[in-house]
Structures are given as C-alpha cells and as structure tokens.
Image (cartoon, helix red, strand yellow):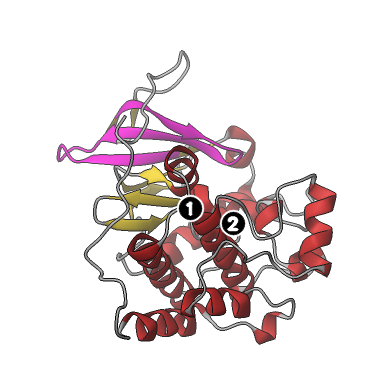
Amino acid sequence: MSNVDPLRPGDPSVLGGYRLLGLLGEGGQGTVFLAEAPSGERVAVKLLHARLAADATARERFRREVETARRVARFCTVPVLDADVRNDRPYVVSEFVDGVPLDRLVRERGPIGGDELMRVAVGTATALAAIHRAGVVHRDFKPSNVLVAADGPRVIDFGIARALDMATATTTSSVMGTPAYTSPEQISGHPASPASDVFAWAITMVFAASGRPAFGAQTIPAVLNRILNTPPDLSEVPEGPLRHLLDRCLVKDPSGRPTAAEALLRLIDSAEAPNAPTASKVPRAPRT
C-alpha cells in the first residue's frame, strides 16, 4: 500500500534508537523514513531539513508544537510517539500508517461516493475537530495529507507543519499551504485559523467526490481569483446533506462557516437518517 523507496546515499541509517528502513517521502519541511523502533514496531520518522535545524527560533517553535500535537486525540490522526528537538537534525517519530494518500487513491480509482465518501468525510472531520480541540491549526489540509488505511482515513502533518511554516514566515508569502486549498482570508493576508482548516477540509471532500478541487486547478492566479470571487463548483457532489454542509463550509466569510465539531455533528445526524450509509465500509486502497 505505502510506497517505500530504498535509502539514498547520504541518508542516515540510524536516528536515535530507530533503524531507518526506507524512504516514504520528502517535502519542503523534511524527509520521512520508514523505521524500526527498538521494540520492533514500524514507525515513521520525519527528519527536518538542515535549513530549519540551524534556526534556534524554529527549533523552539517546533518543540512547542510537538508538545501540542501530542495532546491531539489518537483517533483518525497519526499520533506523535517520540521526538528529539535537541539533536543536530531534529526529528519526530509517529505511528506508521500503511495507507494511501487520498489524492493518489482518487487518481488511480476515480472519485468516491456513497458510503465511502461519507466514511472519509466523517473520519476527517473527526480528526480536524480533535486537532482544533488541542489548540492546533493544521494550515495545510489537502488530499495528500489524508491517508486512507484499512481502518479508515487518517489526517497527517498537523501541528508540526504549523511550527515549520512560522519559522519561515518572514521570507515567504503570507499564503500558506497549497493554493487550491487556501481560504479567502489567507489570500487576503490574514493568518490561518480553524475556519481556514474547515474551508480546506470542504475543498478536499469536493475533490474526493469529483476528482478536482472546488475552485478548479488552473494557474495559481486563476485559482486564487476564483476562491475570492466565485462560488464553489459542487455540481459533481451528490445532492444531499453532505453537499449542503460543504456549501456552508465554503462561504467566503470565515465567521459564517461551521466549526469542525459542528460539521461532524451534522454528518453524524445525517448518517442516522433512514437509508444513511453504514460505517462499516472503508474505501479500499489500490493494491501495489
């Protein structure tokens, strides 16, 4: 299910007591490795890039955010198990989830619907509510940060992503995250908030249902203009409670959006209605 590449020349073989087994992925903030803990358990280890490790302010913010992330409830997220922020190259250890990112799942299988779509919506809203309850703003909620596993969806890269973004905020645009999933208020220069996460969650659910973001995927200026000035395209989301909820989550004014907890309650209420989808069906990840 998860793609694991061999370690590259120059990659460490051991971090702390964790033996690195392969490469899971790499982004602007760090490299993620599959590793084996001293207990024999498989875990994911994220090693920060050197440019962030050399910044004392970034280290302190990272430490605070790791502590916050540890308070997030485990369900529907990937919990932090360990971290070493005093190491020459700080790293964080989390549970390894053998799943497939939602963007890859939709790309390989096509859009999802029915019971599958409701299960992803409920699971990710549960995770987002737990993240916000812990005082964390995700800042980069998008399909590639949702892992679909055998036991349901998991939201990844919360909290820690915020710490790293803040460390470079003086040298980057005020628009954080991925443009197609950015809220109007962020585009206008306001900081990310729980309401911004709800906006990004709704666009992610539209992508799951249709295979494309709610405001298109053209050039960045075109997408940002549509987010600011046009209504979302929900034409391929099935008519019903979920579509109505997504419409409310995508209003331009953040004060008009439901919170993640309110969105979750609305989803649960709709699932209890007659003919509602059952919770037993989980999107099947493609075999690799």
Do the residues bearing badges 2 and 1 touch, measured as CB atoms within 8 Å? Answer: yes
Is residue 44 located in the magenta-colored stretch of the structure? yes
Q: Position of residue 221 (x, y in %)?
A: 84, 51
Pick the quarter of the image with the C terminus.
Answer: top left
CA gap between label 2 and label 1 equals: 8 Å
For the record, the magenta segment spans: 20-46
* Residue 151 horizontal side relative to residue 225, left or right: left
* Residue 228 horizontal side relative to residue 55, left or right: right
Residue at the far top in the pictured view: 9
* Residue 36 horizontal side relative to residue 253, left or right: left
Closest to the observer: 163 or 109?
109
Is residue 59 located in the magenta-colored stretch of the structure? no
Snapshot quadrant of residue 198? bottom right
Label whose residue precedes the other's in the sequence (2 or 1): 2
Amino acid at the residue labelled 2: Asp
Q: Position of residue 197 (x, y in %)?
A: 58, 68
32 w.r.t. 256: above or below: above
Can you see residue 160? no
Name the residue located 57 percent from the left edge and 73 percent from the top edge.
Answer: 246
* Residue 9 horizontal side relative to residue 225, left or right: left
Closest to the observer: 183 or 226?
226
Q: Position of residue 215 (x, y in %)?
A: 71, 59
Snapshot quadrant of residue 33? top left
- Residue under pointer 1: 157
Dot 2: element: loop
287 w.r.t. 222: above or below: above
Name the residue located 76 percent from the left edge and 64 percent from the top edge.
Answer: 227
Residue at the far left in the pictured view: 39
- Residue under pointer 2: 140
Amino acid at the residue labelled 1: Asp
Dot 1: element: loop
